[in-house]
Amino acid sequence: MLGITPDAILPPDIDEDPQLGELPRPYCARVAREKAMAVEAGPDDIVLTADTTVALGRRIMGKPRDAGEAAEFLVKLAGRRHRVFTAVVVRKGDTLRERIVESRVEMKRLSDIELNGYLATGDWRGKAGGYSIQGPAGAFIPWISGSHSAIVGLPLVETAHLLQAAGWPVWRDT
């Protein structure tokens, strides 16, 4: 959406498990930072990483291991509001620039047919909290407060700002 094509997409190999007693906001920021530091890059390369975390109160609802855990997450989220944190980190050389965006999301109550139908799509795989607002589960979200793009996984305003601060000309004449 920002008109940027990366030179490479390199998935960082880090442990994304929360540390004992870690709260959702600092957890999300830590994981995004660790991703940025895990990517090999030259001193003039710009590395962009992000992490999205779904939080129900103090509980971090990560990526479900299987359909059973996805169902557990969705049952807990259904009919309630929760927070979605997305941390963005831009690294150039040894300099890290970071932002974290908090949005609030309400998920409607789910019938058994809706829950099982959604689980059958497989869209829950690899998704924090077991859902993605840009996928079929978007039909379960009647209300948000905050950044839609952050809930999707990359807050565009903050990302553009961080890239510009690192020297990448996001808005240039064509």
Image: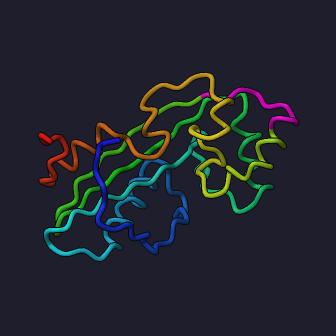
Using the image as rendered, state which of residue 93 and residue 83 is in the foreground: 93
Q: Is residue 108 magenta?
A: yes
Using the image as rendered, state which of residue 148 and residue 106 is in the foreground: 148
Q: Which residue occupies the extreme right position in the image?
A: 112
Horizontal and vertical percent for residue 169? Answer: 14, 48
66 sits left or right of 98 in the view: right
Q: Is residue 145 magenta?
A: no
Horizontal and vertical percent for residue 161? Answer: 21, 42
Q: Residue at x 80, y 49 (%)?
A: 120
Q: Which residues are magenta?
A: 106-114
Q: Residue at x 36, y 58 (%)?
A: 49
Q: Residue at x 67, y 29 (%)?
A: 139
42 sits left or right of 127 in the view: left
149 sits left or right of 7 in the view: right
The quadrant where residue 125 appears:
bottom right
Q: Residue at x 56, y 43 (%)?
A: 55
Above or below: residue 13 compared with residue 148: below
Q: Quadrant of the C terminus?
A: top left
